Image: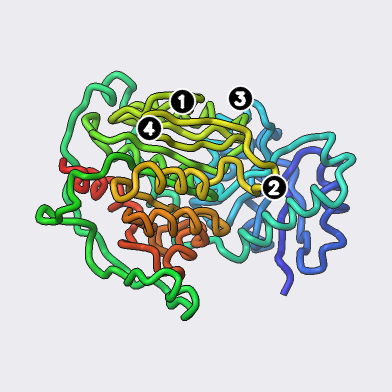
Amino acid sequence: MAINVLVVDDSGFFQKRIAEILKPVSDIKIVGFASNGREAIEKNQALNPDVITMDYEMPVMDGLTALRNIMNLKPTPVLMFSSLTYAGARITLDALDAGAVDFLPKNFGDLQHGGSNIRDLLTDKIKNVAKYYNRSARPEDYRVSRPSVASAKAMVTKPIATKPTATKPAATSPAVAKAVPARPVSRPPSSRNDTRLHKIEVVLIGTSTGGPVALQKVLTSLPANFPKPIMLIQHMPASFTGAFAERLDKLCRIKVKLAEDGDIIKPGVALLAPGGMQMMLDRNRVRIFAGDERVNYRPCVDITFASAAKHFAAKALGVILTGMGSDGRDGAKLMKESGSSIWAQDEKSSVIYGMPMVIAKANLANAILPLHDIGPLLSKEVGL
């Protein structure tokens, strides 16, 4: 069955070019076009598309307003077209917060002259969103309060204790089970009597599609006196990570900054890996470098997790949140072998249950948790 796509853009050129790019793809069908946000809302109701591609700047009603209306009236997975600029990054982050599942770079030159590469990008995004998008993970499940910068940084509060719901990981093959003999855990993470408590020296969180809002949910729940450093690895273009770090820092009580080569690892500071680069840890600092172009993801969760396994061993905690693909699985395996614990987001609260799913299927998860429990349980795990 073909994936039905609604293309929303006020430019006739872009509408035509997207149609030309997708025409050879047999299992994707463009069912309609809309030239403004109001028309997009109407056509979403009438045509029932599987995926919407949405421009931002349009007459009558802009894309962000249209997106909010769509998510309220008839939720449908939306891919936002975004310019790779600082302003474009801020608008795109607002769109993700409002319910967009992912974004596509909007570059006139690529769309005008791009061949198989732009077709592959569009096709992969559309197919993956149509296949893996979790329609039960609504934006309100991720919503966080937005205190002022001054009040957020000044507050020091204890997290609200909650009971996590553990879920059995999916079955794994005998070969994987033999390679990774860890058992699925059907209990919450460590309790007050657990000898591991307080021994964690660093927390690492890896994520991809759906990650910006998921990270926002987790980090805003942490108190200002969170006593451990946090490393964040989010699949995101280089032009976006600076704006994303600034956004998180304004919303969170802990300090969040874009990682730079040589940054000292400090308690209560979250370092976000810059887009287009790799981030590794040693005992006291982070190393930022270009890395091997053969690695699909930059930044790559596997690379950062592997460095934590080497330098922190059992004193590291890895967390895998929503995202497409399998990045993080190999690094999580190395962390487990060194004695670390791994948590994974559960299927119900994941926008895209890909990265957490492969952790569960490989039997690597010490705990599988709903998104809203992860932040409070991190605080509990480090002794708050």
Residue at mark 4: 270
Q: Which mark is residue 86?
A: 3
Residue that carries the numbered disc 1 in the rendered image: 246
Identity, as a three-letter code, of the amino acid under mark 4: Ala
Mark 4 or 1: the one toward you: 4
N-terminal label among 1 and 2 = 1
Contact (CB < 8 A) between labels 4 and 1? no
Residue on which disc 2 sits: 294
Question: Mark 3 or mark 2, which is nearer the start of the sequence?
Answer: 3
Q: Residue at x 16, y 38 (%)?
A: 158
Total labels drawn: 4
Which amino acid lies under the numbered mark 3 shown in the image of this protein? Tyr
| Local SS, label 1 | helix
Front-lying residue, 64 or 25 = 25
- Residue 78 horizontal/vertical position (percent): 61, 51
Front label number (1 vs 2): 2
Q: Residue at x 16, y 40 (%)?
A: 384
Mark toward the viewer: 4 or 2: 2
The location of residue 333, given as percent across then percent down, is 44, 59
- Label 4 sits on a secondary structure element that is strand
Q: Residues within 10 Å of mark 4 (few under 14, many from 20)?
A: many
